[in-house]
């Protein structure tokens, strides 16, 4: 045993560049998914603002609706849509790792889990879109 | 035998001369089937005896030769040079303090993280010896067999961005090994382990990057083990709220 202080040690880790998450595709996807939290938060706040306007009466809500039909707002909403699709798809792709791998003693392969995840996601989205269009 | 020459760029340190980190290049003759570790041994035997790196078994079971090869965490004794171009970079594992050249300080994992999850069979009361061994069916063994393949090489810690940011994070291998014993039909210590896993710096610090499972050279899936433990920990918590009297 060497008494403390006699060995020279670098007590720091290997320096990592700030762009570490760009060096590996999987890190990049992970960081992008985490970043989608910001547009998703923006969408929630927008919905709350719509509710406030709605409670303030018809004219106030309709003025908001006409403002939101501007190209800038459509662009913002399209961006939020892309972000939420990215969030959902990358999460569903992780699902096989998160679910119990055994159901009644049989190992579940990833394919049915992925199929179930995507099918449920598309079905629920389809129902919501149908309701919104019908209303 | 056909031979090619590759350039091995090794990240080294020189603390005495205050130069810090520098790259030293070596040219190594490579034969078919040589591993990255073989190239390093060639360098130390034939070119530069001052190069420091850690290795022992050369057959992927001791877990001591983990390094960063071309910026990926790899077990160098299992890392075939045929899969690389004629120039490779070798650096110490990320996320660990460097002792010298390619040797990192593994005390944090070995002394703190690993023992914190009690990775051994816990019995409330040991059965007397004359009752024989604790029997287990192949189906019961299959539940934890994957997780038991861990060789403590720490590549998963090197791949984990959470461990980099949060040094107190218990980390992938320790939690996969906790699950290895939690899922063992002979074990009775999951309650004690879950009190560690549900606490700070454990399960709930994992943000599910999933890179630990990609890095593992032994087919262990720590990401899955952790997510499954999260489900179990949440159920235990809910049960403790709804049925407080059920607490062991």
Image (spheres, coloured by chain):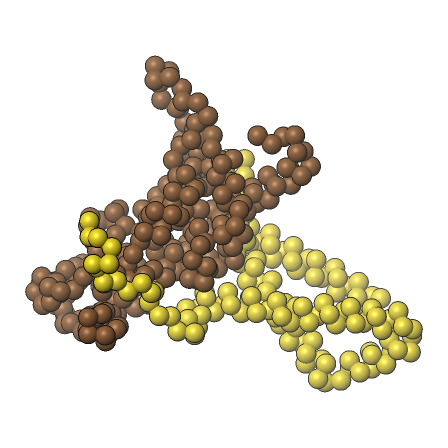
Chain colours: A yellow, B brown
Give the camera-side residue of A87 and A48.
A48
Image quadrant in which the C terminus of chain A is located:
bottom right
Q: Residue B50: percent from the left, percent from the top?
A: 13, 65
Q: Residue B54: percent from the left, percent from the top?
A: 21, 56
Q: Is residue B35 visible?
A: no
Q: Residue A132: percent from the left, percent from the top?
A: 79, 66
Is B179 above or below relative to B37?
above
Give the camera-side residue of B145 and B130.
B130
- Residue at 36% x, 22% y is B133
- Residue at 66% x, 68% y is A40
Left or right: residue B49 versus residue A134 is: left
Q: Is residue A43 visible?
A: yes
- Residue at 63% x, 37% y is B240
Is A86 above or below relative to B233?
below
- Residue at 55% x, 62% y is A90
Q: Residue B15: percent from the left, percent from the top?
A: 22, 70
Left or right: residue B97 versus residue A113 is: left
Total marks placed: 0
Q: Residue furthest top?
A: B130
Is B231 above or below relative to A27?
above
């Amino acid at each position: 045993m060497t008494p403390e202080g006699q060995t020279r040690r670098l007590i720091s880790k290997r320096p990592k560049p700030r762009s570490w998450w760009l060096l590996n595709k999987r890190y990049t996807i992970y960081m992008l998914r985490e970043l989608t939290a910001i547009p998703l938060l923006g969408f929630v706040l927008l919905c709350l603002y719509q509710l406030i306007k709605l409670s303030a009466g018809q004219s106030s809500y309709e003025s908001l609706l006409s403002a939101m039909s501007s190209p800038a707002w459509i662009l913002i909403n399209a961006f939020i849509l892309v972000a939420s699709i990215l969030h959902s798809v990358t999460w569903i792709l992780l699902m096989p790792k998160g679910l119990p791998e055994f159901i009644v003693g049989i190992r579940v392969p990833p394919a049915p889990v992925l199929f179930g995840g995507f099918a449920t996601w598309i079905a629920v989205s389809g129902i919501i879109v149908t309701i919104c269009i019908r209303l | 035998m056909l031979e090619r020459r590759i350039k091995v760029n090794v990240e080294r340190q020189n603390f005495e001369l205050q130069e810090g980190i520098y790259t030293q290049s070596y040219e190594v003759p490579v034969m078919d089937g040589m591993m990255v570790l073989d190239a390093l041994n060639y360098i130390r035997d034939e070119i530069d005896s001052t190069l420091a790196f850690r290795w022992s078994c050369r057959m992927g079971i001791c877990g001591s030769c983990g390094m960063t090869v071309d910026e990926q965490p790899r077990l160098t004794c299992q890392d075939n040079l045929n899969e690389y171009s004629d120039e490779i970079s070798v650096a110490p594992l990320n996320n660990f303090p460097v002792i010298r050249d390619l040797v990192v300080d593994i005390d944090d994992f070995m002394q703190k993280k690993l023992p914190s999850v009690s990775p051994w069979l816990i019995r409330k009361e040991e059965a007397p010896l004359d009752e024989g061994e604790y029997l287990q069916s192949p189906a019961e063994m299959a539940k934890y067999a994957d997780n038991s393949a861990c060789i403590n090489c720490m590549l998963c810690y090197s791949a984990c961005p959470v461990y980099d940011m949060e040094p107190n994070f218990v980390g992938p291998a320790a939690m996969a090994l906790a699950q290895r014993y939690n899922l063992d039909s002979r074990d009775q210590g999951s309650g004690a382990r879950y009190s560690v896993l549900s606490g700070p710096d454990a399960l709930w610090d994992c943000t599910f990057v999933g890179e630990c499972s990609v890095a593992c050279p032994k087919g262990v899936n720590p990401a899955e083990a952790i997510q499954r433990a999260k489900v179990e920990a949440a159920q235990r918590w809910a049960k403790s709220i709804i049925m407080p009297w059920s607490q062991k």
